[in-house]
Image (cartoon, coloured by chain):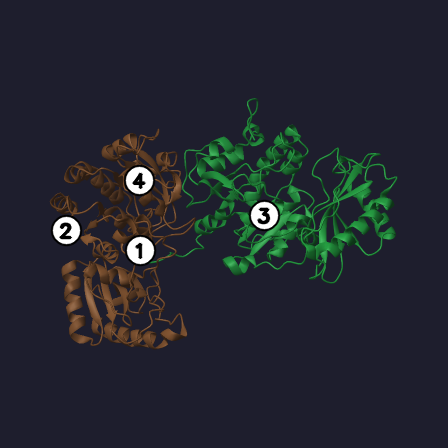
Chain colours: A brown, B green
Amino acid sequence: MADQAHGTELEDAITPNLDRLAREGVTGLLEPVGPGVTPGSGPGHLALFGYDPLEFVLGRGALSAAGLGVELHPGDVAARGNLCTLDADGNVVDRRAGRITDDEARRVVARLSATVQGVEIHHEKGHRLLVVFRGEGLDPRIGDTDPQTTGVSPLDPRPLDPAAASAAELVAAKLTEIHRALAGEPAANGLLLRGFDTHRELPRFEDRTGLRAAAVAVYPMYRGIAKLLGFDVLGSPADLADQVRLLEKHREDADYFFVHVKDADAAGEDGDRGAKVAAIEGVDEAIPDLAAALEPGVIAVTGDHATPSQMAAHSWHPVPVVVHGPRSGRDDTDRFGERWCRAGGLGVRPSMQLLPILMANAGHLAKYGA
Amino acid sequence: MADQAHGTELEDAITPNLDRLAREGVTGLLEPVGPGVTPGSGPGHLALFGYDPLEFVLGRGALSAAGLGVELHPGDVAARGNLCTLDADGNVVDRRAGRITDDEARRVVARLSATVQGVEIHHEKGHRLLVVFRGEGLDPRIGDTDPQTTGVSPLDPRPLDPAAASAAELVAAKLTEIHRALAGEPAANGLLLRGFDTHRELPRFEDRTGLRAAAVAVYPMYRGIAKLLGFDVLGSPADLADQVRLLEKHREDADYFFVHVKDADAAGEDGDRGAKVAAIEGVDEAIPDLAAALEPGVIAVTGDHATPSQMAAHSWHPVPVVVHGPRSGRDDTDRFGERWCRAGGLGVRPSMQLLPILMANAGHLAKYGA
């Protein structure tokens, strides 16, 4: 988001490689879900993969489970958990437990797993957990306990439908046990749950497109959504350099590669403008290596949603996109950034329209009609 | 509408305040109903309020009735009436009876009401009347008698569905009586009817959005559409200065304020380019007062349709829009006008998408999905 004093983080970042893609290719803006709609990561990615995010709905719990390789069965309920810091009055002080380290978080999870029975807790990354309630016919229509803000207490798990009353009771009872077990932890003395969901089946990407797809992502949740759609998930890379190595190794194994980079979004959520600019410049530096690793016929660079550091949150603002390939055409846009891409040849359009444009560019779509 | 010799009236007007909004905010073009579709005022406004104008249909009669506070019941039929001037052959010379004054029009309506029984005639504004046929089971599917042009005779009221045959006969009989009663009037010797409709119930704006809405409009019809959607209608202002005073007084009484200004549209319908430019400059001058009266979090300026003076009629051309607020972002557009706004960050989009964008800017929408 640009304001009077700044361009967007992307506009202000130094990005010679992305600018070259913009200069040689065609640009535009993508609106992930709809006008004014701020997407979660699930709908943002589904749209990029060509799935209508209003037709296909995925809770965070189902995403996280898929990312960790935890199988959900009908009747189970899963939620995304945040380790958090509560003050003496039980109010949330930090929704991310001071960005707790992986090691610390694993220790806390081990302590919880040893103490609290009847709930499965998996560490995901940093403060992020997956919490699974196994049962028969548990209904996932339960309201988030994460208040999405600080200075207030966690919300009660509330049934959003009468059918979810017993599941909500079970969650409330387990949360009481969990908070008792966490008492005395310095940073991670609370747990917030959101995105309750159950087992989901989505149509496979390959069945819809005829393309073999692969994903390389550092964060489990993004591997999770790819896995739910039937992508091959390539390893568990630690960073972008690892991702490049995996792509090089598997370059012949898929037609469509999804490369996810989290850093710019994480910095945006932290409200850290400088870190977000640096993260974007880090992606820019990796572009030549990514291109050399894959030698792709068509390259697209975009986001699943905006995360302006001014808002320290996801937002509804359209995101820039560039499509680069021998048949992409080009436009007059010669820098990659919102203000230049909006005048580009792709116009302003829904994110779910990107995939067919990429497929056409790669020669995967036949003529319609005679 | 721009041509080889002119920009649009808005492009040629001197509008420093609107230009500032454009420079600091984000701009675009709105297409009220669909490509190539010229909207009436009903669909134009419904779209701006976030109602799909193809789903929610309102006849002009229903709009006018709501504006005048005339209650329609199922089975009644209402139409918008224009006092007009007919020549000796019965052809329309002036569809607006020489822009007859309110006083003159009221005198004519009183004369009609005293002479013609079984039809209710209400004066609206200038040449504009509301004509209500009370009955049981009258069907409103009747074709307009307004030919929308001069040099031809008024059309017969034609049933558009067999079920409307008796209603059309009633209307025809009453029109004969009315024209007999108007014989000898110097300017207003004819009556044209259009937009036959009956009682309508529309979902309330507050139920759809959670927002309390208020309207300030000089012309009754625009208060009418707002009232149909459950807006608070603030007074009966005489001019824009009155509107500003009402807004200041009621600034705490609503979340969403609809401020309607008619003058530019009226001048466009008259084909008076100079008057339209002046009307637009009048709106521009009022912007600081409007902003001071409301201190709004988010400002949007747009139209419900185009009315190019070259056409002297509504048209299908997209209308410019600016959205201005702390989270609107900005684009490279620094003047408010069609040719600059079309390169703006909102792109070219349906008018009904404006409301969710405003709601997002004002922080009234939650995140979609996890």
Dot 3: element: helix
Asked if badges 2 and 3 are on one and the same chain, I answer no
| Residue named by callout 3 | B43
Disc number lying in front (3 or 4): 4
* Marks 2 and 3, how far apart at CA: 54 Å
In the image shown, does A282 or A300 lie closer to the viewer?
Answer: A300
Disc 4 marks a residue whose amino acid type is Ala
User: Which part of the image, by quadrant, shows the N terminus of chain B?
Assistant: top right
Indicate the quadrant where residue A240 lies.
top left
Whether residue A7 can be seen here: no
Asked if badges 3 and 4 are on one and the same chain, I answer no
Whether residue A281 can be seen here: yes
Disc number lying in front (2 or 3): 3
User: Which part of the image, by quadrant, shows the C terminus of chain B?
Assistant: bottom left
Q: Where is residue A276 in the image (x, y as percent from the top left)?
A: 26, 44
User: Tag 4, which chain?
Assistant: A
**Residues at badges 1 and 2 in contact (C-beta under 8 Å)?**
no
